[in-house]
Image (spheres, helix red, strand yellow):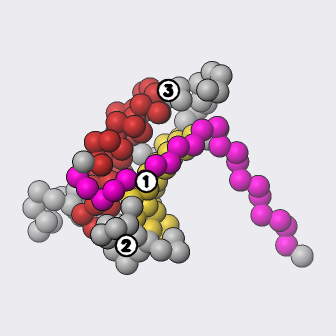
Amino acid sequence: MTDPAPLPTPLLREDRLDYTPTQRSIPLARRRAARLVAEWGQPGLAGDIALVVSELMTNALLHGSLRGRLIRVRVTLGHRTLRVEVSDPRGERLPSPRPVGSAAGQFGRGLLLVEAVTARWGWEPRTVGKTVYAEWDISSPARHPLR
């Protein structure tokens, strides 16, 4: 008999919103995520969150979008981790950072930025599509009443 799987750590905060796959959605998602993270007691991470949401949303728009299918942004705050997820419907197009000096020219380095400002990032398959995530380790979330 195997031990039961550990229970997931409850989230302190969670937000998710679906966006249309248009250029206009990128700044909307970026501003929303940065504002939420600051409201959740992590204002020092708001700039990094904005950068990462912008990069992951841009990648989802350029490489993961399909006509008529939405892109989901989910931001969660746990006791030790802040996580941003961007989900798109194209599971066959996986993220891959391109090294500096590659033939891609000025494009393809957004994931290197994501890697530089996060504790870790990666991707997970979905039934339809994929989720690209980025995580930051936090020492302790600021405590203030839930709204």
Residue type at mark 1: give it.
Asp
Q: Main secondary structure of the magenta part?
A: loop
* Boundaries of the magenta span: 2-23
Find the residue positioned furthest to the front.
68
Q: Give the CA separation, mark 2 to mark 1.
A: 15 Å
On whether residue 20 falls in the magenta region, the answer is yes
- Please give left or right for residue 86 compared with residue 97 in the image: right
- The N terminus lies in quadrant: bottom right
How crowded is the residue under tag 1: few (<14 C-alpha within 10 Å), some, or many (20+)? some
**Dot 3: element:** helix
Q: Are marks 3 and 1 in contact (CB under 8 Å)?
A: no
**Front position in the image: 99 or 121:** 121
In percent of width and height, residue 123 lies at: 45, 64
Tell me which residue sits at (51%, 71%) in the image.
Answer: 126
Amino acid carrying mark 2 in the image: Arg
Q: Nearer the viewer, residue 43 or 102?
A: 43
- Where is mark 3, residue-wise? 39
Query: Please, is residue 72 above or below residue 92 in the view?
Result: above
Asked if residue 101 is positioned above or below residue 55 in the image, the reply reads: below
Left or right: where does residue 18 sit relative to residue 14? left
Residue annotated with mark 2: 90
In this figure, which residue is indicated by the disc labeled 1? 18
- Amino acid type, label 3: Glu
* Residue 68 occupies quadrant: bottom left
Which quadrant of the structure image shows residue 138? top right
For marks 2 and 3 on the same chain, the one whose residue lies earlier in the sequence: 3
- Asked if residue 126 shows in the view, the reply is yes
How crowded is the residue under tag 3: few (<14 C-alpha within 10 Å), some, or many (20+)?
few
